Amino acid sequence: MAILSALWILLGLYWGRKAQNMDGFMLAGRNVGLAFGTATAMATWITSNTTMLAPQFALQLGIWGMIAYSTAAFGLFLFAPLAKRIKQLMPAGYTSGEFIRLRYGNATWYIFLVISIFYGFTWLISMGMAGGILMNALAGIRYEAGMTVILFVCVVYTVFGGLYAVIGTDYIQSLIIIIGIVVVGIAVMSSIDLKQVYVDLEREKPMLINALLPASIMAIFNNLLFGIGEVFHSNVWWSRAFSMREGIGQKAFTMAGFFWLPVPIAAGFIALTSNSLGVNNTAPDMVGPLMAGRILGQTGAVIVFIVFFCSLASSIDSLLAATSDLITEDIYKKLINPRVTEKQLRKVSVSIILGLGLLAWLVCLPRIGTLATVLFFAGPMVASTIYPIVMGLFWKTASAKGAIWAMALGTAVGLTAYFQLGWYTASLIGATVSILVTTAFARWQPGNFDWKNLDESKLPGKPLQR
């Protein structure tokens, strides 16, 4: 843990030297190429939720559970053409919030900021919790200590290097993750008898191999829409679209989706073998690291520890940078101090990163619920933003009223479903309501937006030229 912590901080400081201005700090100079672009998208999406929630899905929802989690790859696949469109329409853009403000006006922008910042912080909390759970399961390190270390390390190098440091470390982390997954996969396949695994499941947990389990089928569509909503609205992915060179975004996101797709399936499959290997799962979100440590032994556990540490760091640093950008650019600069200088803005951004890290640490201390319950509460909120964003990028007729009501009603109805029906229905229902509302307004109260208004660098009265 000490070696990895020092490595990421040093690498972050090394790459962060390039961040001489706010374009460099927030968007890596808008010059990220295909290799780094693909690596950062894949590494950011291989989170604790991929390596820990996918096994939990498999244990609770069976074979469809692990496949359901893999559908999150479609968030990257479908965002690929959006990334190209975003770069064309907003070549000097900074955040997803900026798009909503320019496209739909301030009222929709306020709702979007609440949803996006709440989701980003929820995801950050789940990452911090996962860090503590991981280190406790694999190394016996106390939950509080492990969680503190992973948050501290990511905050340090993100503060000094911004997105340059984030993307640089993501590149190394993605290579380590891919190598580690291959090693774990070979070890698992050489340690089990597939026929015996099936027999054990059929005898003791037949529901897990039931192809018609209603909750599992519902979870497939719910997770698909949740994954799409996570990517489409989040400034984590918009900042990468803005940071990549012209013509790179679509290719990078498509390749990242293909690299990511098999990871949750592999992680979920490992969980289904736990009963055959006699592993006692005291908590569903701990089965992944417990199984890997059991199969690979002490040396293998070190490999798995490194892979999990990398997957956590590659997501936490991205969340810190992207959420800080959203608060700095959309709230502080646009609402509080429009005349702020670039030097002052850098200090504000650093302060916000430190504040986010501290607040996440305080919330993670009591370890509230499982990773699934923490994360999926935000599902209907982000799912309600999918169609307003898609229509806003491609259809002039998408209206501000439609976007406002789509987000508000989609969130409200989806959260009701979360509590009344189950988390595996919330995103599906929230997205459905949002699609119907956005389409209805575009049909009967259409707008007529001028795409030129999305390039704020060319609009008169811009308060800060960089």
Image (cartoon, rainbow, N blue to C red):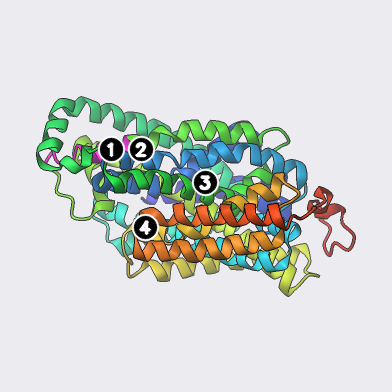
Earlier in the chain: of badge 4 and badge 3, it is: 3
- Residue positioned 25% across, 48% down in the render: 60
Q: Which residue is pictured at 59% across the width and 31% down the height? A: 35
Cα gap from disc 2 to disc 1, whole angstroms: 7 Å
- Label 1: which secondary element: helix
**Magenta region, residue range:** 266-278
Label 4 sits on what residue type?
Answer: Trp
The mark nearer the N terminus, 4 or 2, is: 2
The residue carrying mark 4 is: 423
Which residue lies under the disc numbered 2? Answer: 67
Q: Which residue is mark 1?
A: 63
Q: Tell whether label 1 touches label 3 (CB within 8 Å).
A: no
In the shown orientation, is residue 282 left or right of residue 367? left
Amino acid type of the residue that numbered disc 2 sits on in the rendered structure = Ile
Q: Foreground: 169 or 64? A: 64
**Mark 3, secondary structure of its residue:** helix
Q: Callout 1, which amino acid?
A: Ile
Question: Residue 329: image x %, image y %?
Answer: 69, 62
Mark 2 vs 1: CB contact within 8 A:
yes
Q: Which mark is residue 228?
A: 3
Q: At which x and y percent is residue 398?
A: 71, 53
